[in-house]
Image: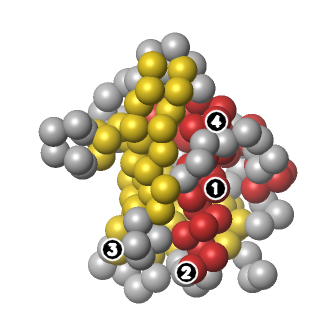
Amino acid sequence: MNQPKYQLKAGDNLTTYEFLSEGSKGKIVKLIQFTTTNYHDVFNLAFGDKDGETGQIDDKVISNNGDSEMVLATVVSALYAFTDKHPDAWIYATGSTKSRTRLYRMGITKYLKEVKTDFQIFGQVGKAWEEFEKEVDYESFLVRRKNQ
């Protein structure tokens, strides 16, 4: 994605990334985390505001900082960085609510042509996975970097 993005600060093993969102509500620390799952080479992507007390991701808070395009581009840049280190990884993502999952779908749709050059993208409907299509109400997403 050739969009403006925030500078990422990566953790030691490139599974956690932090950045500072700057917008109408001020500066908000955001976290992106890739965690292992019970499936080989499948990682869960978690994203949200950094809780000031626990240091953990709060994926329920609604920041509305007015910089959603830059935030989305920054999450995608973390996806590139993570898959550079883990080229065989599948990344599973879903929103903490139906409306957030819908926002993710809209973000993927907006940049679909660009993203499909580097990634395979699948959406889940019920128990089935299918190649991502616009206008389908997916429950979750599965993404994998194409061979480089």
What x and y, as percent, mark residue 42? Answer: 44, 75
Q: Amino acid at mark 2?
A: His
Q: Amino acid at mark 3?
A: Thr
143, above or below 28, in the image: below
The part of the image, by quadrant, that contains residue 13 is bottom left
Q: CA distance from mark 1 to mark 2?
A: 14 Å
Say which quarter of the image contains residue 5. Answer: top right
- Provide the residue designation for mark 4: 70
- Of badges 3 and 4, the one in the foreground is 4
117 to 32, vertically: above or below: below
Mark 1–mark 3 Cα distance, whole angstroms, equals 22 Å
Instruction: Please name whichever residue, 37 or 10, is drawn nearer the observer in this view of the structure.
Output: 10
Q: Marks 1 and 4: CB-CB under 8 Å?
A: no
Q: Position of residue 109 (x, y in %)?
A: 71, 42
> Mark 2 highlights which residue?
86
Q: Residue at x 49, y 56 (%)?
A: 9
- Residue 127 in the image, given as x and y percentages of width and height: 44, 61
Badge 2 marks a residue whose secondary structure is loop
Q: CA distance from mark 1 to mark 4?
A: 10 Å
Three-letter code for the amino acid on which mark 4 is drawn: Met
- Point out the tag, 3 or 4, that comes first from the N-terminus: 3
Q: Quadrant of the C terminus?
A: bottom right
Query: Could you say which is closer to the camera, residue 4 or residue 89?
Result: 4
Asked if the residues shown at circle 3 and circle 2 are in contact, with their CB atoms under 8 angstroms apart, the answer is no
Q: How is the image coloured?
A: secondary structure
Mark with earlier residue (3, 2): 3
Residue at mark 1: 77
